Image (cartoon, grey):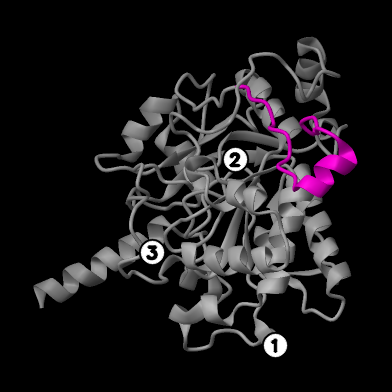
Amino acid sequence: MIRSFILILTSFLYATAWAGEPTSQPVAVEAEEEADDHDEDEAEPANGIDPELEAIPGANVPLDDTIRYTTDLTDQDLDKRFCGDLASLGSISVGFAESGRMIGAVKMSQDPAWTLVVPEYAWGTQETVDYLSAAARLVKAQFPDSVPLRVNHIGKKDGGYVRPHRSHQSGRDVDLGFFYKNDVGPGGLPRAREKLIDPARNWALIRAIVTQTDVQVILTDRRIQNVLYEHALAQGEDKEWLDSLFHAGTASLVQHARRHRDHFHVRFFSPRSQELGRRVQPLLAKRPDENKVSHRVRSGDTLGRIARKYGSSVRMIQRANGMRGTFLKLGHSLTVPMRGPCTQCPLPPPFIVPARRLPPELKTAVGTPEPTLTTASH
């Protein structure tokens, strides 16, 4: 009797503490993505680095400490527009993919080339939306009778934690569903997706993303990769180029990740949005409505401890997260409003967008490509 009462009380506290946050996802596909196969092939990466995490040492991104993608804005111009005309700056990606947020996010529209599975989670940077739209339309042009590309989660309007993902916080990640043979999904056969996917359309999608966008990484299970690699090779694609995409270790654009056997997880570079995020971070305290940080709850955290860490208050955190109590759940992400500048917020380093990794025939046609600034400069 006592034990039942404790269980009921615990459930009630948890429910009231997280009032305002959806208790379930609108579609089952996302929950399925998190709980997919757990067999012997789902091992951790050999180098011990989770490819979904971005704020890690040794990330394969060239660094450059100069301003490259927002050269139209001096520090004075940026300060003035951030404080007085924020919308004119466009989308801003703050922090890392797994510990960040967005300002001025862009919502992806509906289109015959794609369908938004969860429209309220279809917010991203301008570059992400532009790149994804271009790739989807290219696939639709090649396969006009195909069903639309299924766009699952990009991110929330203000970024931050999206259940059940570890990333998708700064507007640059998107989950894309596979194209299946005869447009018939796997049904009750989740462990045989590599046998059911349509290699032609899925390869066309990957090829479009690689050649037409500034993609940082594409995550999917190695069994899916094997099917796409063999199909592309059989279609006459250059083997050396394919190996650079699939078989180059940590330098591969397409990498294996656990629980990614039923979708592609694509992360784009968003050079202007990312550089704006890095440059405005010291200015956030000038706008109380934007002076906030995303904090992932860890063992030992309390609302009081989190408030002291960021110069906030328990009441401010409760109000920002729709909380009525103080109960915290490990792994959840809190929006923490701050009273002053954040001295502990993760600040991504400046970077250079690498040249696109093109196949031989496109290299010959366009020459050696320069890093692309963005398709959406302001």
SS state under label 2: strand
Residue 190 visible within the image: yes
Q: Disc 2 designates what residue?
A: 101
Q: Is residue 265 left or right of residue 108?
A: left
Q: Nearer the viewer, mark 1 or mark 3?
A: 1
Determine whether label 2 and label 1 are within 8 Å by CB: no
Q: Disc 1 designates what residue?
A: 182
Eyeballing the image, is 185 above or below 217? below
Query: Residue 186's spot in the image, x, y percent?
Result: 54, 84
Q: Nearer the viewer, mark 2 or mark 3?
A: 2
Q: Nearer the viewer, mark 2 or mark 1?
A: 1
Among the two numbered marks 2 and 1 on one chain, the one whose residue lies closer to the N terminus: 2
Residue 148 falls in image quadrant: bottom right
Eyeballing the image, is 5 above or below 243? below
What's the CA distance linking mark 1 and mark 3? 43 Å
- As for residue 364 lying within the magenta part, the answer is yes
Q: Which residues are magenta?
A: 350-372
